[in-house]
Each structure stands twice: as C-alpha cells, then as structure tokens.
Amino acid sequence: MPNGCVTVFGSSRVLPDEAAYRDAFQLGRLLVEAGYTLCTGGYAGVMEAVSRGAVEAGGRAIGVTVTSWAARIRPNQWVSEEIATADLIQRISRMIAADAYVAMPGGLGTLGEVALTWNLFQTESIPRRPFVLVGREWREMLECLPAAVRIEPRDLDLVRLVDAVDEVVPAIRAAGPGLPAAP
C-alpha cells in the first residue's frame, strides 16, 4: 500500500455489541480507505474489529500472534496474514515495526504496548512516527500521568490525542512520514 502500515493497539476484551468494537471497525475501514495496511495483535476485541473493518473495506489485516498461546487462543477470522512469533517480546517488536501507531482504549496489554512504543520514541531507539491515542480514556490518563511519573512536556509531544476515530487519519497525515505527531 502506498501509505504504509499502521499498527493498532487495543483491548482484546471488547465485544461486538459494544461501542468500542464499532469504533474499531470504523477505524479499520477508514485506515484502509486512506491506503494503509493494518497490523494488530491478531486476536479478539479491538484487534478483531479493526481487522474486520479493514478486510470488509477491501484491505489487508496483518495479525502478529504468539505461538505459545496457540493452545488457548486463536487469531481472529479477519486476519489476512498471520505472523507467528515465539513470545510476547517478539510480538511487540514486530508490531512496532510500522509507519504509524494508533491506540484505542484497552487494558494492561494495551498500556504496555503504548508505554513501550512511547519510550522507544523518547529514548530515540526508533524513529519518531505518528502515534495517535484515541478517546477520553487516554486523555484522562495523560492528564494525571505527570503527577505519578516523571514526564516532561517534550515527552507528551511524542503522542497526539484525538477524541474519535474519524480524527485518526488526519492526525497521521498531519504528522507526515517520520515526523512527530502534532500536539
């Protein structure tokens, strides 16, 4: 795809009848319509919804899975291409090899993926790329974060907060390839 690959992080516990699932589905559709390939962790919840939206819009959904989890969890049916990794660290490493990142609300796994990606930008371990956090949950967390951990305004400049999925593609495009997202 001409615009590259976007990794989407999000909860595995979101169900199809929830608004978060519908939002993730719409996000998958919007990203594919903008010319992106999707990458997710490949399992249920947000990962399934965004993959389904992408595939139903005629795009591809790459799912990065963990082989040691295969006995208890399977990739969702919308994964177009599965990349199986040996462990969680390799999985996250593969997911971070993208052109942009989007984080929907999630749990500890999503928080870990967001924190690691953000820290890799902060330490200049990987090139800065568009990184969009979607929803009030991220906004609330970022508002209280400086009271809990040592964080500086320049660290906050590494991510872009948006309220809704229809703001994601414009936020990615505003950042441009290899540029930091606009605050």
Image (tube, grey):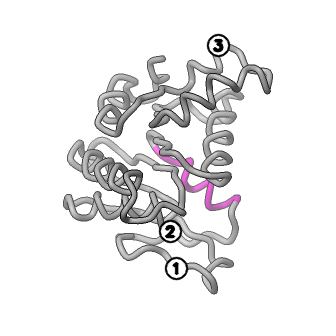
At a point 70% along the width and 26% down the height, the residue shown is 145
Q: Earlier in the sequence, mark 3 or mark 2?
A: 2
In front here: 117 or 144? 144
Q: Secondary structure at mark 2?
A: loop
Question: Which of pointers 1 and 2 lies earlier in the amino acid sequence?
Answer: 2
**Span colored in magenta:** 89-98
User: Callout 2: 10 Å neighbours few (<14), some, many (20+)?
Assistant: many
Q: Quadrant of residue 76?
A: bottom left
Q: Which residue is mark 2?
A: 43
The tag earlier along the polypeptide, 1 or 3, is 1
Residue tagged 3: 153
To which residue does mark 1 refer?
A: 74
**Dominant SS in magenta:** helix
**Distance between mark 1 and mark 2 Cα atoms:** 7 Å
Please report the residue visible at 63 percent of the width from the left and 31 percent of the height from the top. Answer: 141
CA separation in Å, label 3 and label 2: 34 Å
Label 2 is placed on what type of residue?
Tyr
- 31 and 97: which is toward the camera: 31
Q: What's the residue type where badge 3 is placed?
A: Pro
Q: Which of the pair 47/122 is nearer the observer? A: 47
